[in-house]
Image: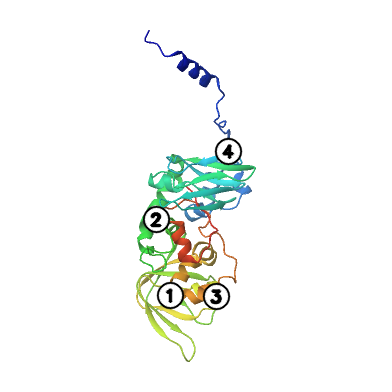
Amino acid sequence: AGGLPKAHLQARRLRMAAPSSAAPRPQLGSAAGSYDQMPANSLLCAYLEEDARRNFVDSAAEVKVRRNEVIMRQGDKGNNFYLIKAGTCEVLIAEADGTSSRRQLGPGSSCGELALITGNPRCATVTATSDELVLLMVNRRAFMAALGEQVKKKRTTWMPFLESVSIFAPPSTTTDYERGLLADALQPRSFEEGDVLTKAGTLPPEPLFYLLKEGQVEERTAGPAGTKRTLQQGDFFGEVELLQKSPCLATRVALTRTVCATLSADEFVRMVPLRALAAEGKQQAYALGVGTTRERGRRYGQSAEATSVSAKSAAAAAGSTADAEGGA
């Protein structure tokens, strides 16, 4: 009396006897030597010198997973940062409005940093799509000690500024996470009054995309129909020259002490989506006109963290570019 019913006991015995359907736990190995066997990762390059990058990569744990295995699941707690050494995986972002988007990651990409930096749950589900996916795994403590605090500090400093720039300001065709990746890549440059930033008709040794953070810059275009205007905080320039690979279209001179955030040509092409320029009225005809002249790289750089912004609204505003990376 008082015991469990016989049918319940039999069902429990069957469940205990049944083999587990869970996949075996992947075996961890050493990642020593991996730094020289994989493409550079942009997040690491933005914050660490080469020796530190090598140590970070080669000190990770290597794990191999099979096709269709889930590396991280949206909504779960984040404990690790991942670098992709070999193979591919798919990032699935499920939005609150029921829409979803899918992106692919390949060698040299990374995912998982956002959950470690913010403490928020994973923002996407990442699943292996190649027969074998080789990952380098770094736990939260090691990631934060090596570069996590630097990433957090720089994004806190620069993301509010990016939100003041028309092509990145929310609501816009760029997401919070894209602005975070841009903040990682930005290089501040200071100019004194009278310094020439660009000279019309010349090819600069290092073509750059400029975002004006502090100060004023006078811009004079060449030719009999040349124009003059004063650029203020939040203005940007250099994008036309970078996309056309042309000489500078204007001479730009600092009117006061000036601070600009800059992106290299490769970073600009890889990280600033054409849809952002197309959404800016004065840039729309140009951006759409040259959009096919150069193959664009991964829209999110080589990092991958999911965002909470609707992929559907981004695609509608863009006219749509759907390559790129995302993560969790």
Residue drawn at x 38%, y 53% as measured from the top left: 153
Residue ID for mark 2: 155
Residue at the outermost right position: 131
**Residue 190 percent coordinates (x, y):** 40, 68
Q: How far is mark 2 from mark 1, CA to CA?
A: 28 Å
Which of the numbered marks, if any, corresponds to residue 281? Answer: 1
- For residue 121, which quarter of the picture? top left
Which of the numbered marks, if any, corresponds to residue 289? Answer: 3
- For residue 115, which quarter of the picture? top left
Q: Earlier in the sequence, mark 4 or mark 2?
A: 4
Going by the numbered disc 2, the residue's amino acid type is: Arg
Q: Secondary structure at mark 3?
A: helix
Q: How far is mark 1 from mark 3, CA to CA?
A: 14 Å
Going by the numbered disc 1, the residue's amino acid type is: Gly
Q: Earlier in the sequence, mark 2 or mark 3?
A: 2
Q: Secondary structure at mark 1?
A: helix
Q: Earlier in the sequence, mark 1 or mark 3?
A: 1
Q: How far is mark 2 from mark 3, CA to CA?
A: 32 Å
Q: Nearer the viewer, residue 169 or 224?
A: 169
Residue ID for mark 4: 63
Q: Nearer the viewer, residue 14 or 150?
A: 14
